[in-house]
Amino acid sequence: MKVYEKAPSFYEVFERKSGPAKQATHYCPGCGHGNVHKMIAEALADMELTSRTVLISPVGCSVFAYYYFDCGNSQAAHGRAPAVATGVKRANPDSIVISYQGDGDLAAIGTAETIHAANRGENITVFFINNAIYGMTGGQMAPTTMIGQRSTTTPLGRQEHLHGNPVRMCEMLATLPAPTYIERVGLGNSKQIMKTRKAIRKALKIQAEGKGYSFVEILSPCPTGWKMDPEVAREWVSKEMEQVFPLGVYKDESGNVDEGSWDRTFKPFDTDEVNTYLQRMKTSMTEGEDVVLKEDLRCKFAGFGGQGILTLGLFLSQIGMRAGRQVSWFPAYGPEMRGGTANCSVNLSNERIGSPLVDEPNVLVVMNQPSLDAFEKTVPDGGTIIVDTTIVEGKPDAERLNAVLIPASQIADEVGTPKIANVVILGALAAATGAFTPEFCMDTLRSVIKKKNLIDMNMEAFQKGYEFVKNM
Amino acid sequence: MAIQFMKGNDAIIVGALAAGCRAYYGYPITPASEIAHAAARHFPALGGVFIQAESEVAAINMVYGTAGMGIRTMTASSSPGFSLKQEGLSYCAGAELPLVVVNVDRGGPGLGNIAPEQADYFQVTKGGGHGNYRLITLAPNGAQEMCDLTMKAFDLADKYRNPACIMADGITGQMMEVVEIPEAKPVPYDHSSWAVDGTPATSKNLISSIVLEPEELEAHNLKLDRKYKEIMAKEAIAEEYRTEDADLIVVAYGVVSRIVYSTVDQARAAGMKVGLLRLVTLWPFPSEAIAAHAERDVRFLAVELSTGQMVEDVKLAVEGKAPVHFYGRCGGMVPEGAELMDEYRKLMEGVVNA
């Protein structure tokens, strides 16, 4: 009689279990966990899946499932088993991953993990032990506790208006497109138990064949939590629980999905492949030459969003990088965004750069009036201020500052589009600071502008800006 | 030129790939989202895993799953999201799992704002979740370090079987600098003795943080404690700039250390002997580097983007042997160089900022 053997997927002796009784489980008499454990263990052995199985133990009475199963075991935080199972399965698609969970774990604290693992169609198997009570923690209400059922936190019985209704997980999950197989079974009598055995095997087979997410809810007795004799508890499963949690198949696509269709791939670390990939990330810029700066450039570029302020900063940064300088670029961010302006700070230096923030710019570009109002005063005496006079009406203090007034947007418009006013400004900046030759700047731009059909227009914009300042 | 101009947040993923990280699980949040964007582009392209999880809680638990297999894995977030990960990090530390978590610190408490702060110092360095545990914590202050220290974090996590944290700030995440692309090398750690990866070779192993018997849990805690003491003895890193003769040593990390660095020469030119002691590791805290200066006539000034967190560890390191002052900005405000110079002047004149 095979039924009385210990399943070979169980440990012979439960060494991980504390206390002297190393061959008995920790479950109470009449508890459903023992039945389900045994049916899973037998299925794993018969299907020859044990050695590549990872069983995720939840929090709750089955927290110690790893005492018993002679397979890989991982014990998860309360409700997180489907997330842990995801992390295992994705990193080894050949493993068999079982998320074994009780009702509090799966349908209360871990509802989100349950739904989203199902919704992603993780190729895992979830066994959901629904016994309508919190067993381990002392008989409190579960999300599946029935209306009128007493628990230590519903001493007068669960009431709809105070505690909500029992949650039906199979019905909810069956609304999702991804799951392959969802069935609710029970342990109320031997006929039900035989159906449970079949459902467990079917769910594991679906996973082993790469057919996707399988979910088996098992209505299970908890004589201790329910304060019933084991026999009465069994009857209560089939008489009472079934009324609220009808048994049956809620979804079964296993005949319609191909084997392997839910398998994911995972490649282990391959240093050669990663190095080849990383080398492709390096800059596409042509080799430059070292250009020593006469003075560090501490730039602030400011204007409206959409004027290419951040790109202007990036272009100058890339020129600096190609010239072998230390460079930092920092976009307006958080409280620095004032008055609807976009701005960025750019540092170019011969030496290691300290603060990436530019509080006192020696080069300020303003492309709208609020930026002139906000930042002109931050420029130290003798600093350079470049103003797009097409847009900015006010005038900077030309006595105190090296003021470069250029109708950049108008020039850009004449070249082809006002969108490249920022490149006109870059030309003006190169001329005003003398930090880099126009040829060096234009060579850099050529190698960093991605849309090759726009290069000529950008070159013209740069030259116009450069010449405007040279002819001032 | 194997260099690229990139954001600190992007550099984290470059470092992670080079370190052999194969799975990224995360949830979007400003100002850390670029890390997830980069992971979404690069991990699947290299046959690895990227999942945008349903929550921060799920993300760290997916990490728990993969880390338990002995495979390098990570997650990243910003302060409110990092708070949500604490449960999972406690489990990871309890189960002794190697992994990397990034916190690009933003303004708090609560929803706060998206601007830079360093007010997660306590949460990051003192445990954060429940129980006796620590995160190995590295604090990069530029894009190259976002890459390099991420690689180092993976090594330390593997070496000690403990979660490691990159504690950055909004500015270090968002700013772009030149980054030299690193070379990927094989991972020199074999985790088959404890990992559970769904193969017959590891099927007798168990990943767990539950230890039911008080005697055994105490022993487990003491074992972790010995590990933490070893990390404290071996892994603390600080960088110093002109501290040897300084009358005022400014202690800072992350972007603040960059701002302070900018002021040191300026202060010297103004006749104030200021030096910078920059923390690279926040935990283990470089107490010895600080204590080494405390014996002479010197003052310390802790500058941070908080109302005073790291300063407590400076005081513990100094043991009352020298005055320890504090200057902080928070809520996303960042001190300007001139502001720090004023503070130095006050202290050097003996005007104590109480």
Image: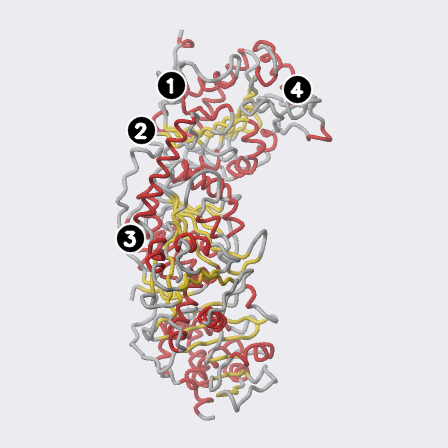
Q: Say whether mark 1 and mark 4 are on the same chain.
A: yes
Cα–Cα gap, marks 4 and 2 = 43 Å
**Where does the image place residue A263, in percent across and percent down from the top left?**
41, 37
Q: Looking at the picture, tell me which residue is in the foreground, B351 or A286.
A: B351
Q: What residue is shown with label 3?
A: B184
Q: Say whether mark 1 and mark 2 are on the same chain.
A: no
Q: Secondary structure at mark 4?
A: helix
State which mark lies toward you, 4 or 1.
1
Q: Is residue A203 left or right of residue A233?
A: left
**Where does the image place residue A398, in percent across and percent down from the top left?**
53, 90
Q: Looking at the picture, tell me which residue is in the foreground, B107 or B271.
A: B271
State which mark lies toward you, 3 or 1.
1
* Circle 1: residue type: Phe
Label 3: few (<14), some (14–19) or many (≥20) C-alpha neighbours in 10 Å = many
Q: What residue is shown with label 1?
A: A14
Q: Secondary structure at mark 1?
A: loop
Vertical placement of A133 versus B196: above or below? above
Q: Quarter of the image for the N terminus of chain A: give it.
A: top left
User: Along the polypeptide, which appears first: circle 4 or circle 1?
Assistant: 1
Cα–Cα gap, marks 4 and 1 = 37 Å
Q: What residue is shown with label 2?
A: B200
**Where does the image place residue A59, in percent across and percent down from the top left?**
50, 29
State which mark lies toward you, 2 or 1.
1
Label 1: few (<14), some (14–19) or many (≥20) C-alpha neighbours in 10 Å = some
- For the question of whether residue A235 can be seen, the reply is yes
User: Along the polypeptide, which appears first: circle 2 or circle 3?
Assistant: 3
State the residue at coordinates (46%, 81%): A461
Furthest residue toward bottom: A471
Q: What residue is shown with label 4?
A: A243
On what subunit does the disc labeled 4 rest? A
